[in-house]
């Protein structure tokens, strides 16, 4: 079970990874010539053998394995060159990894000794503007067996891993939770390396060897660029793999590993029954893969630009993110109340109609008028939100008030973080609802919860716009975009928080940090499978507060909350 | 031309098995589906058959171009594919008496992809995976007018309406 975490100075999305030059990578890869390191004893199953691996539309690789650590490689019948390698076996499958001498590329080869089929991952550096990002191309083929006709079968891309989740513990001691809710992306929680606070996402490959054995790879694109690739037995929950890349200190990570773990569950797939196809690459170009690169969209602003923002769009007209929103509630109209929070803040309200309110901090004399919207998610539970005009950081409040219990929780949104001037930040305020007609509780409050953690909910906002939330940790949320065929596709994640309002009613927010800066807040009603919510962001078009509304489906749950609880 | 072989809408429908739209019928057009239907000489009939085949090929080429991304006034940029609306049993091509113009009615299914016009992360990501649109399939009728210029048939106009 999980070791005590070592929290990093910065989480992965905040690390300013060095832009390594080609020359620097050359230097650092010199150590890879000896092959990958390994904690486990390397396999010598290949020692003394020769293999000729023929791939479709790819290279023919001729190998002579001198022993368990050295091989000679001939690419496409070219001259042979010696290099170090490392191999590990998982049942009848052998994985071996090596670099090409004098080059920034190498091969990770998976050979099924039973069938003679092989999958080859060619990997290389300096193939993208970010040189450190490992590129890859996947070739399917077979091991040539003298005189025998080539087999017709091949390993192939698959969606049969989609929806699975595992806890893995490598022989290195590294522990992760890994979720595969997509056919070409995946989500990983670094329990030991990053403390398990957040989940992150990377483009991934899924290859089927047989019903038990699969090859998985991911690359930490937009982060360190490191590739993790392994063969996993999903039935026995064992893995052998390789990790290649440069860590946050720019040190080379090149090792093979053996691991085992726990099956965490299976969430739903949404392809048509019978569809087991994997995600095809987006083009025939070598190395092509779909990668979400939000920080390259030129959305960030300077502090001066943010300070100069005066335009605000507050609950504008119809939006694709609110195509299925609930009707605006009239519950608050003509009411007067005070929200008193435990942090000392108290806000007095006069709701003049269903979309206009006046507010002031307790003790102030002047009212400030704002446009608001509200929804009654459950009987007596109202969510509403508005800007806090005049406050220093383009502030907003998103409030869930339970009038039956006198409780209120607010998400206080502000614009600007130490990292990005127009990125939203959030604080959660717990408190009570004070009215002339009721006395609120003195001790009871809403509270943070992990009851949503591990769940997956799909959200259909409007025609053509459906995503799935995967609540990966108590502090992060991942969202997955579906393809037209229902397969999980592009995925990203951000910090999040969850508050229990009532049984089956949860307030969640997520921050699209280092993404587009949005603070999304939704009130999830698990009984109606409907949410209401508010998006908040600041861009070059100004400040925006907008409604969110979607219909949900429950896609399942991973058994993961236990991994995040503090232990003695 | 006598009363027995004068082309009529009734005669055309009975021979072509097609339901022409009102504008097409009003044009007094007829289809070259058989000598007995049009009252022309075998040579003229052969010419008309060749014309009809050329027009049909022209329409197929048009559909092919639409499926490869071309657009025009009738087929907007959101249409990404036309597919057959049946086996062509309701399609019709009618030549004018002088054989220099023609009108065609083609049943098809128009598959359109209307971009979701919202600036948000989900749409950005959907676009990044080649999507981010609302896909609809609508049974439609393509009505096209053709003209023969320098011996070659060209499309003069195309309109589209729901079937």
Image (spheres, rainbow, N blue to C red):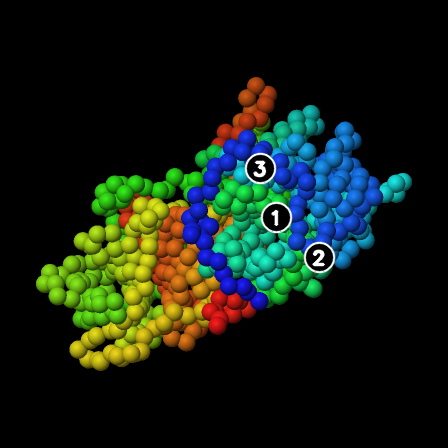
Neighbourhood count class around disc 1 (C-alpha, 10 Å): few under 14, some 14–19, many 20 upward = many
Q: Residue furthest left?
A: A365
Q: Quadrant location of the N terminus of chain B?
A: top right
Q: Residue at x 40, y 58 (%)?
A: A510
Q: Position of residue A33 (x, y in %)?
A: 67, 38
Q: Closer to the observer: label 3 or label 1? A: 3
Q: Position of residue A277 (x, y in %)?
A: 65, 52
Q: Position of residue A354 (x, y in %)?
A: 23, 64
Of the image marks 2 and 3, the number of the one nearer the N terminus: 3
- In the rendered image, which residue does mark 2 sit on? A213
- In the rendered image, which residue does mark 3 sit on? A28
Q: A330 or A543: which is nearer to us?
A: A543
- In the rendered image, which residue does mark 1 sit on? A243
* Residue A236 seen in this snapshot: yes
Q: Find the distance from the CA under tag 3 to the CA under tag 1.
A: 15 Å
Q: Secondary structure at mark 2?
A: strand
Vertical placement of residue B91 versus A427, above or below:
above
Q: B68 or A506: which is nearer to us?
A: A506
Q: Find the distance from the CA under tag 1 to the CA under tag 2.
A: 19 Å
Q: Residue at x 57, y 43 (%)?
A: A252
Q: Chain of mark 1?
A: A
Q: Chain of mark 2?
A: A
Q: Chain of mark 3?
A: A
Q: Secondary structure at mark 3?
A: helix
Q: Residue at x 56, y 29 (%)?
A: B97
Of the image marks 1 and 2, the number of the one nearer the N terminus: 2
Vertical placement of residue A532 versus A208, above or below:
below
């Amino acid at each position: 079970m999980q070791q005590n975490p070592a929290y990093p100075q910065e989480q992965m999305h905040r690390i300013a990874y060095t832009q390594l030059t080609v020359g620097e990578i050359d230097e650092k890869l010199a150590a890879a010539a000896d092959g990958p390191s390994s904690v486990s004893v390397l396999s010598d199953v290949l020692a003394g053998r020769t293999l000729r691996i023929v791939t479709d539309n790819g290279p023919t690789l001729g190998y002579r394995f001198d022993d368990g650590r050295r091989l000679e490689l001939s690419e496409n019948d070219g001259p042979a060159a010696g290099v170090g390698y490392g191999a590990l076996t998982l049942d009848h499958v052998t994985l071996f990894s090596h670099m090409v001498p004098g080059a920034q590329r190498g091969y990770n080869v998976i050979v099924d000794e039973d069938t003679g089929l092989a999958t080859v991952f060619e990997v290389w550096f300096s193939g993208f503007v970010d040189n450190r990002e490992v590129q890859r191309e996947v070739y399917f083929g077979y091991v040539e067996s003298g005189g025998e006709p080539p087999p017709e079968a091949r390993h192939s891309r698959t969606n049969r891993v989609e929806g699975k989740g595992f806890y893995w513990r490598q022989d290195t001691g590294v522990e992760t939770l890994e979720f595969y809710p997509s056919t070409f992306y995946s989500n990983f929680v670094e329990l030991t390396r990053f403390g398990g606070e957040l989940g992150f996402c990377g483009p991934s490959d899924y290859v089927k060897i047989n019903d038990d054995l699969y090859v998985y790879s991911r690359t930490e694109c937009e982060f360190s660029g490191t590739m993790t690739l392994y063969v996993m037995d999903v039935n026995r929950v064992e893995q052998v793999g390789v990790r290649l890349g440069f860590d946050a200190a720019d040190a080379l990570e090149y090792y093979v590993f053996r691991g085992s773990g726990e099956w965490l569950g299976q969430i739903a797939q949404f392809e048509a029954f019978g569809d087991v196809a994997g995600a095809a690459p987006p083009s025939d170009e070598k190395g092509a893969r779909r990668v979400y690169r939000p920080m390259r969209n030129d959305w960030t602003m300077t502090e001066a630009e943010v300070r100069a923002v005066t335009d605000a769009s507050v609950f504008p007209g119809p939006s694709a993110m609110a195509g299925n929103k609930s009707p605006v509630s009239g519950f608050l109209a003509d009411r007067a109340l005070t929200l008193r929070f435990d942090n000392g803040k108290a806000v007095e309200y006069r709701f003049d109609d269903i979309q206009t309110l006046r507010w002031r901090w307790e003790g102030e004399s002047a009212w400030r008028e704002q446009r608001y919207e509200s929804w009654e998610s459950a009987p007596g539970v109202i969510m509403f939100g508005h800007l806090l005009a005049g406050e220093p950081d383009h502030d907003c409040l998103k409030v869930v008030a339970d009038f039956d219990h006198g409780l209120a929780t607010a998400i206080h949104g502000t614009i600007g973080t130490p990292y990005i001037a127009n990125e939203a930040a959030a604080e959660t305020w717990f408190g009570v609802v004070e009215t002339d007609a009721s006395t609120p509780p003195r001790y009871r409050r809403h509270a943070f919860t992990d009851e949503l953690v591990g769940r997956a909910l799909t959200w259909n906002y409007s025609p053509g716009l459906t995503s799935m939330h995967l609540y990966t940790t108590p502090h992060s949320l991942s969202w997955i975009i579906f393809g037209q065929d229902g397969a999980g596709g592009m995925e990203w994640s951000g910090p999040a928080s969850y508050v229990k309002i009532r049984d089956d009613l949860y307030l969640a927010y997520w921050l699209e940090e280092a993404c587009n800066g949005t603070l999304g807040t939704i009130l999830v009603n698990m009984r109606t499978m409907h949410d209401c919510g508010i998006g908040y962001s600041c861009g070059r078009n100004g400040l925006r507060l907008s409604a969110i509304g979607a219909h949900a489906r429950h896609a399942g749950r991973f058994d993961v909350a236990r991994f995040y609880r503090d232990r003695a | 031309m006598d009363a027995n072989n004068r082309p009529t809408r009734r005669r055309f429908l009975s021979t072509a098995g097609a339901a022409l739209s009102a504008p097409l019928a009003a044009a007094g057009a007829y289809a070259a589906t058989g000598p007995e239907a049009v009252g022309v000489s075998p040579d003229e009939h052969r010419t008309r058959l060749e014309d009809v085949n050329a027009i049909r090929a022209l329409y197929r080429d048009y559909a092919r171009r639409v499926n490869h991304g071309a657009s025009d006034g009738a087929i907007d940029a959101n249409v990404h594919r036309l597919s057959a609306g049946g086996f062509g049993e309701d399609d019709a091509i009618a030549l004018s008496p002088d054989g220099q113009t023609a009108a065609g009615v083609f049943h098809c299914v128009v598959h359109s992809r209307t971009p979701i016009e919202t600036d948000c992360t989900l749409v950005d990501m959907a676009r990044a995976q080649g999507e981010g649109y609302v896909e609809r399939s609508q049974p439609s009728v393509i009505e096209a007018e053709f003209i023969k210029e320098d011996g070659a048939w060209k499309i003069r106009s195309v309109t589209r309406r729901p079937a």
